[in-house]
């Protein structure tokens, strides 16, 4: 308290003190002058009286002036954002002490507002940093003045003060920014980045409200639409392929129907010849529709792994039994080298039968007559990676084999090495895609090894229960 008071004293300006004293003493001074003029007191007594009045006024006015000076200094400190500023003790200004409290309150509310502002700046920085879009803020010369994390990761961490053209060079974008500058309204432009592979973006440009203290003029948000474009292309390719696959047997069937209604009308021989062919085309269409439905069902269930236990022994026996007639028809021997009991796995019985039927059916379709197909198995131990123990089922044929370069493409929808041959054998080009989808859902894998002219081995690898994966 004492220290506080002395600090108040030191701050009292002489001029203020003098003015205060003069205001208080003015009336008594006047009175003394009048008394001297009327001759009621002597000039000496008046001077002595004036000195006395001056001293008394100073003693009286000093603490008040000191308090006011302290208050002024305090407000000035607050205005200069001095966080160490402390409210002075205004003991001589009892009636105006509330003023000090009010100033203190004002200070507190500024503090709260400042803290709010600081946290909202931090929040907005976090927000733009976590946005998946590339965000660039530009000044009026199109220099980058602020970026978000995605932008720094995509281009370089040193974007500050780089001109936009150095990172995104596009005349339509430049024009669009100029337009935004003129109209004050945001626009969106497409942009293709010539990287390998190409990437596609939609760029939104918005103007910033102009403020003298800010050099932010435009905000650029680059939204990556590469995946969306890829999906759109895949979808339209798929629809085109599916329509083409259905149209071919449909055209053939309609051709037969037209012949039977016109040139071969009432021709029994033609009827007998065409009917089995029409049936074949009908079955082909039916298989295609079945495969397409299977694919869409599998796609919907992909994130839904099976939970039931099932017997590999029994489902493999079912698949082999089902395909035996087709193998016999082509004089192909199915050499079953599976052990009498295979481990039980977690899986969907029907879906796994479909996997082995598709693979066996392919092996039969693409093998020459009088050859052999071997079905064998092995247990794979857990490895250092994430994989635990698994079971591997191999289907090995003595067919023509597959060129190594196209092996990765075999599981693409409608991909065939030899389209004409596949169609002739009743293939849809969807069998291996279905196999892949089912195995993905079972956390399994398909491995293909092939030697042209010698044959192929399609291996299904399925995790055994109790695995980490
Ligand atoms: P498809 O209905 O045409 O058989 P898949 O998806 O089952 O369709 O197979 C895709 C392509 O992979 C086939 O068209 C064929 O060219 C090739 N292929 C599949 N299995 C074999 C195999 N065992 N031997 C040789 N080629 C095969």
Image: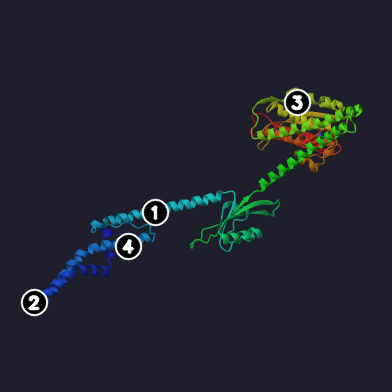
Residue 243 at least partly seen: yes
Cα gap from disc 2 to disc 3, whole angstroms? 140 Å
Splitting the image into 4 quarters, where does residue 329 fall? top right
Vertically, is 102 above or below 332?
Answer: below
Question: Which residue lies at the image location 54% right of the left edge and 60% below the top edge?
Answer: 217
Q: Gap between marks 3 and 1, in whole Å?
A: 75 Å
Q: Secondary structure at mark 2?
A: loop
Q: Which tag, 1 or 4, sits closer to the chain's start?
A: 4
Q: Nearer the viewer, mark 2 or mark 3?
A: 2
Q: In the rendered view of the protein, which quadrant contains the N terminus? A: bottom left
Label at residue 111: 1
Residue found 48% across the figure and 53% down from its top: 121
Graded by Cα atoms within 10 Å as few (under 14), some (14 to 19) or many (20 or more), the crowding at tag 1 reads: some
Q: Report, in whole angstroms, how far the alpha carbon at label 4 lies from the one at label 3.
A: 93 Å
Q: Which residue is mark 3?
A: 316
Count residues near mark 4 (Cα–Cα under 10 Å), then give few for <14, some for 14-19, many for 20+. some
Q: Earlier in the sequence, mark 2 or mark 4?
A: 2
Q: Say few, some or many: other residues with alpha carbon within 10 Å of mark 3 (under 14 / 14 to 19 / 20 or more).
A: many
Q: Earlier in the sequence, mark 2 or mark 3?
A: 2
The residue carrying mark 2 is: 39
Report x, y in % for residue 356: 76, 29
Task: Tell me which image quadrant ligand 1 sits in.
Answer: top right
Which of the marked residues, 3 or 1, is nearer the chain's N terminus? 1
- The residue tagged with tag 4: helix, strand or loop? helix
From the viewer's perspective, is residue 463 above or below residue 119?
Answer: above
Relative horizontal placement of residue 155, taking residue 10 as reference (left or right)? right
Would residue 169 be visible to someone looking at this image?
no
Asked whether the residues under the numbered discs 1 and 2 touch, taking CB atoms below 8 Å apart as contact, a structural biologist would say no
């Amino acid at each position: 308290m004492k220290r506080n008071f002395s600090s108040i004293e030191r701050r009292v300006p002489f001029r203020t003190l003098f003015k205060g004293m003069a205001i208080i003493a003015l009336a008594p001074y006047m009175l003394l002058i009048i008394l001297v003029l009327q001759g009621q007191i002597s000039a000496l007594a008046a001077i002595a009286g004036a000195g006395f009045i001056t001293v008394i006024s100073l003693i009286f006015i000093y603490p008040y002036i000191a308090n006011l000076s302290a208050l002024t200094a305090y407000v000035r400190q607050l205005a200069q954002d001095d966080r160490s500023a402390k409210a002075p003790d205004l003991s001589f200004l009892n009636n105006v002490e509330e003023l000090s409290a009010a100033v203190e309150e004002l200070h507190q509310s500024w503090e709260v507002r400042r803290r709010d502002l600081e946290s909202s700046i931090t929040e907005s920085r976090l927000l733009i940093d976590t946005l998946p879009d590339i965000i660039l803020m530009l000044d009026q010369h199109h220099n980058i003045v602020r970026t978000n994390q995605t932008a720094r990761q995509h281009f370089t961490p040193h974007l500050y003060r780089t001109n936009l053209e150095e990172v995104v060079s596009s005349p339509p974008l430049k024009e669009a920014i100029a337009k935004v500058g003129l109209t004050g309204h945001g626009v969106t432009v497409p942009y293709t980045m010539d990287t390998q592979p190409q990437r596609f973006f939609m760029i939104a440009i918005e103007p910033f409200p102009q403020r003298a203290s800010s050099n932010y003029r435009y905000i650029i948000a680059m939204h990556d639409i590469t995946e969306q474009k890829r999906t759109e292309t895949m979808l339209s390719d798929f629809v085109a392929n599916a329509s083409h696959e259905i149209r071919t047997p449909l055209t053939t069937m309609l051709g037969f129907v037209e012949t039977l209604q016109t040139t071969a009308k009432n021709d029994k021989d033609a009827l007998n010849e065409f009917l089995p062919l029409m049936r074949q085309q009908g079955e082909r269409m039916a298989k295609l529709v079945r495969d397409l439905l299977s694919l869409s069902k599998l796609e919907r269930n992909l994130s839904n792994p099976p939970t039931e236990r099932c017997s590999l022994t029994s489902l493999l026996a079912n698949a082999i039994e089902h395909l035996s007639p087709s193998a016999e028809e082509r004089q192909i021997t199915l050499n079953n080298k599976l052990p009498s009991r295979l481990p039980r796995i977690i899986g969907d019985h029907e879906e796994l039968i479909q996997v082995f039927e598709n693979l066996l059916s392919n092996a039969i379709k693409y093998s020459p007559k009088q050859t052999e197909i071997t079905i064998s198995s092995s247990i794979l131990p857990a490895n250092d990676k994430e994989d635990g123990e698994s079971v591997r089922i191999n289907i090995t044929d003595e067919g023509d084999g597959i060129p190594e370069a196209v092996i990765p493409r075999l599981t693409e929808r409608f991909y065939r090495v030899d389209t004409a041959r596949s169609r002739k054998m009743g293939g849809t080009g969807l069998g291996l895609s279905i196999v892949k989808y089912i195995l993905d859902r079972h956390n399994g894998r398909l491995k293909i090894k092939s030697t042209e002219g010698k044959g192929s081995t399609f291996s299904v690898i399925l995790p055994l229960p109790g695995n980490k994966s």
